Image (cartoon, helix red, strand yellow):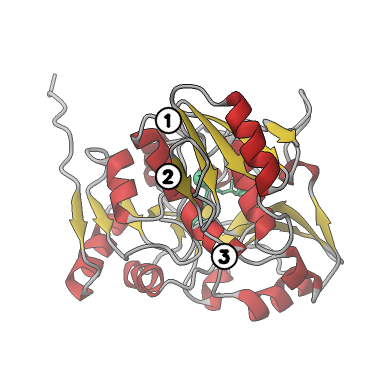
Amino acid sequence: MKERVPMKTEVLQPDEQAIQKAAALLREGDLVGMPTETVYGLAANALNPAALLKIFKAKGRPQDNPLIVHISDLSMLDGLVSRLPTIAKSLAQAYWPGPLTMILPKGKQIPYEATAGLESVGIRFPSHPVAQKLIAAAGLPLAAPSANLSGKPSPTTAAHVYEDLNGKIPLILDGGECSVGLESTVIAVGEESVRLLRPGGITVEMLERFCPVEVDDAVCHQLKQGAVAASPGMKYKHYSPKAHVVILDGTLEQFCTYLSAHKQKNTYALVFDGEQQELGVPSLTYGGNAQEQAKELFAALRKLDELGAGVVYARCPDRSGMGLAVYNRLIRAAGFEIISL
Ligand code: TXA
Ligand code: MG
């Protein structure tokens, strides 16, 4: 039997030549690490079942978790979706390109390997210029989940992708640090309203300018045992660092009091900018305002693992605007462990 040699993973600056190389790999059915404005994606030809299966294998992703299909032009929608509700048209006009994924009726061209057997498909038009150029150069819609190993925080730099997928994919395009830092907003689009399945850079308030928004229960709460997830990705313990993360909901003063009463060896604090003084334990910050928190959260979670943190007590983000997305990711990293002070 042929011995399996681990693949050499190249990391390239996304100049014209590198984009052409990546596009050729995608056309041949290979995988490419691709920068987007939200997080890095692990891209494959969305129309090629064998290429799609490689994504699941490289990430160790459960087969029942559907992928998002990325486009670089509205004209690509033909064949990818069977119908475009009026609300979807308005939202596309307002927020595409950008961090919004719409779940729409699946078109004939999309194989079930992309949708995990569902009759709907998630579509996103990213705003990152490298993602747009790559999709256009490949001449294909690209399926791309976040480019992390399943269960790890999503990658916001090319180095994070390399850390997780070195030896498993041929190429990563290095587009620098992602500007949003959390995955796209995912909505199921109905005829008269939308349902928020995953909060992100396009906030509830921004969606409400166009239509009523129902926030799915799983956004802020753990799914009850046996309940069916509207978005399969929501049932997994995502974004989880090795450390045991606990969110403390209260003022900074209450946080400090709790920390000094409960700190042990290897306890870390995860706090906001400007709060690091006098905590009495080693700490990391994850931004000041909600935009900064979104941008810095995943890198901070990875850093805590690197430091070998045991227990991490985290400050609780405000749940309005972009803060809802930060809260949604942090509470999953904490396995839904939150203490009201
Ligand atoms: O920002 C993003 O969306 C990034 C970048 C790379 O574009 N991608 C990303 O993909 O976060 P992924 O696979 O990590 O998350 C996709 C989420 C999952 O929770 C999945 O269950 C949900 O979207 N999803 C995809 N298609 C769906 C569908 N047809 N119905 C319901 N949920 C769907
Ligand atoms: Mg993901």
Sooner in the amino-acid sequence: mark 3 or mark 1: 3
Sooner in the amino-acid sequence: mark 3 or mark 2: 2
Crowd class of label 2 (few under 14; some 14 to 19; many from 20; radius 10 Å): many
Circles 3 and 2 in contact, beta carbons < 8 Å: no
Numbered disc 3: secondary structure: helix
Q: Of circles 1 and 2, which is in front?
A: 1
- The answer to whether residue 204 is above or below residue 145 is below
Residue 209 horizontal side relative to residue 173, left or right: right
Numbered disc 2: secondary structure: helix
Q: In the rendered structure, find residue 339 and report the number of the disc placed on it.
A: none
Percent across and percent down for residue 328 are 66, 47
Sooner in the amino-acid sequence: mark 1 or mark 2: 2
| Cα distance in 3D space between marks 3 and 1 | 25 Å
Q: Amino acid at mark 2?
A: Leu
**Residue 262, located in which quarter of the rendered image?**
top right
Percent across and percent down for residue 190 are 81, 61
Q: Residue at x 57, y 59 (%)?
A: 184
- The answer to whether residue 259 is above or below residue 88 is above
Q: Amino acid at mark 1?
A: Ala
Residue 316 horizontal side relative to residue 134, left or right: right
The C terminus is located in which quarter?
A: top right
Q: Residue at x 52, y 72 (%)?
A: 76
- The answer to whether residue 316 is above or below residue 274 is above
Q: Which residue is mark 1?
A: 309
- The answer to whether residue 73 is above or below residue 119 is below
Q: Which residue is mark 3?
A: 291
Percent across and percent down for residue 171 are 23, 53
**Residue 168, located in which quarter of the rendered image?**
top left
Q: Amino acid at mark 3?
A: Gln
Circles 1 and 2 in contact, beta carbons < 8 Å: no
